[in-house]
Image: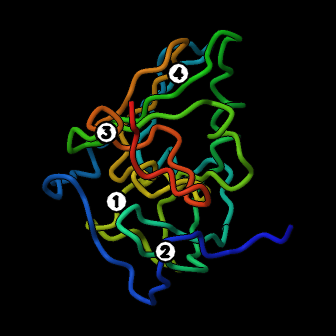
Amino acid sequence: MSFKRLPPGQKLTDDFPVLHYSHVPKIDIEKWQFEIKGKVKNKIKLSFIDFIKLPTIELKSDFHCVTGWSKFDLLWKGVLFKDIVSLVQPFAEARYILISSKDGYTTNMPLKIAMDDDVILAFQYNGKPLTLEHGYPLRLVVPKRYAYKSAKWVKEIEFLQDEQLGYWEQRGYSNSADPWNEERYSWR
């Protein structure tokens, strides 16, 4: 069975549409902090300057929106989520993460999904800093899931033992968000 790059029900676009559930927040980069907390040995708080000093990587990946569009070959620069995990050292009981954004948005996923080789906390897109509309200063990018798992304006990640649903997941969107299985909505 061959892998199809464009998931079913998606249309390819050259644009990079801007969608979010609320307003675009104001960011004071001098006061901004990225925090990791919860079931980890090493809780951290990093300024933007400290964050970009971590080992970085450039990754090219595709992006799939639950509204039906996909964009291929987006170039991200940032820190692999796996490298953050190495830094904070989650306890064995940490099986989920909850991501919180500056605008109040949250999303969640099993830790094993976040550990994929292409999950990145990005601060650049196509060789330039993220724009505010696309998540400046920090965006989580989870290429194998619908984009509502790729939270913008990330400020905090909490490692949890028990699953806690995020904003859209509480409102009927699929918790697994797998584009190749068209897992757009939850039918609980």
2 or 4: mark nearer the eye: 2
The span from disc 2 to disc 1 (Cα, nearest Å) is 23 Å
Above-or-below relation of 183 to 95: below
Circles 1, 4 touching at the beta carbon (< 8 Å): no
Comparing marks 3 and 4, which lies closer to the viewer? 3
Q: Residues within 10 Å of mark 2 (few under 14, many from 20)?
A: some
**Residues at marks 3 and 4 touching, judged by CB atoms closer than 8 Å:** no
Residue 135 numbered tag: 1
Q: Which residue is mark 2?
A: 10
Nearest to N terminus: mark 2 or mark 4: 2
Question: What kind of element bears circle 2?
Answer: loop
Residue drawn at x 72%, y 31% as measured from the top left = 86
Q: Any mark on residue 159, and which?
A: 4
Name the amino acid, label 3: Gly
Marks 2, 1: nearer the viewer:
2
Q: Is residue 86 left or right of residue 23?
A: right
Circle 1 sits in a helix, a strand or a loop, which is it? loop
Between residue 151 and residue 154, name the one nearer to us.
151
Image: 165 above or below 68: above
Tell me which corner region of the image, top left, top right, bottom left or bottom right, holds residue 2.
bottom right
Considering the numbered disc 4 on the image, is that residue within a helix, a strand or a loop? strand
Q: Residue 185's spot in the image, x, y percent?
A: 39, 46
Q: Amino acid at mark 1?
A: Gly
Using a 10 Å C-alpha cutoff, classify the residue at mark 1 as few (fewer than 14 neighbours), some (14 to 19) or many (20 or more). many
Name which of mark 1 and mark 4 comes first in the sequence: 1
Reading the image, the residue beneath label 3 is: 172
Task: Give how far apart the Cα atoms at labels 2 and 4 are.
Answer: 32 Å
